[in-house]
Amino acid sequence: MSWMKGDLLSKTRRLAGGLATREPVWLKAMEASPPPVFPRSNGKIQRIVLPEDSYVRKFTRKHRQAKLDDPNKASAFVPDPARVYGCRVLQLTENGISEDDAMSVANMEYLSERKEKKKAYKRLKELAGLQDKSPPPKPYASAKKDLQIQETKPAKSVETPSVRRLVNLLKKQKDVLLMDKTGASANQDHWIDE
């Protein structure tokens, strides 16, 4: 199908020139000012590499639990800890600190932030206990529990409460009709016993 190659203008010219279709009204105007032609890739898509990517990989190797802090917020505005670590290392190296020192400082900052969040959660948990409320969700849940929760959620959502309510309503109506036995529709043969 070589006649389908090309842009809209060349395809329309071929179709109109081969008498497959009438010449559209807009063809002469488009020939006078053709649309821009954008360059195409040759099938080789280049990998996007950011300057902090090497530090992000080092961070994820060192802190595996930080990788699954919140897998649902992959496209959130708040960057993940690994990306923050990589940007911080770059910022420190631009200010003249050696790479090893910058990595240790960024690592120390991450660990202190994590420790502060755990302390804040512990305090929130105590306050919730004093107020007889349920505690807030953990800021750093274990990766195993997160995966287990994600696996068990679909199994629980098979039967919805509205279906239960409908079944209970039908059972009550059946019981009322069987006790009443005055109407013609109270015949037991029309009901399916479970």
Image (cartoon, rainbow, N blue to C red):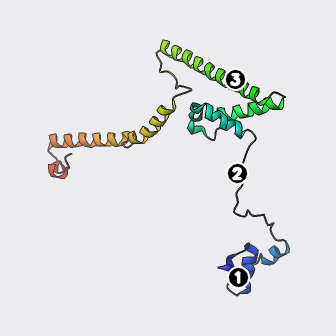
Which of the two discs, 1 and 3, labels the residue nearer the N terminus?
Answer: 1
Sort mark 2 into few (<14), some (14-19) or many (20+) by Cα contacts within 10 Å: few
- 123 relative to 60, above or below: above
What's the residue at 72%, 77% (across, down)?
Answer: 11
Give whichever of discs 3 and 2 has the lower sequence position: 2
Categorize mark 3 by other alpha carbons within 10 Å: few (<14), some (14-19), many (20+): some
Q: Nearer the viewer, residue 180 or 19?
A: 19
Classify 10 Å Cα crowding around label 1: few (below 14), some (14-19), many (20 and above): some
Relative to 24, say whether 90 is above or below. above
The answer to whether the residue labelled 3 contacts the one labelled 2, judged by CB atoms less than 8 Å apart, is: no
Give the mark nearest the N terminus, 1 or 2.
1
Are discs 1 and 3 less than 8 Å apart at CB? no
List the residue tagged with mark 2.
47
Q: Residue at x 80, y 68 (%)?
A: 35
Q: Secondary structure at mark 1?
A: helix
View extreme (top): residue: 130
Q: Quadrant of the N terminus?
A: bottom right
Label 3 sits on residue: 109
Disc 1: which residue? 15
Residue 94 placement (x, y as % from top left): 83, 32
Residue 114: quadrant of the picture = top right
Residue 14's place in the image compared with 36, above or below, is below
**Total number of numbered discs in the rendering:** 3
Up/down of 192 relative to 103, above or below: below
**Three-letter code, disc 1:** Leu
In the picture, measured across the screen, residue 1 lies left or right of residue 101, that is: left
Residue lying farthest to the bottom in this orientation:
19
Quadrant of residue 37 in the image? bottom right
Residue at 62% in and 35% down: 60
Three-letter code for the amino acid on which mark 3 is drawn: Glu
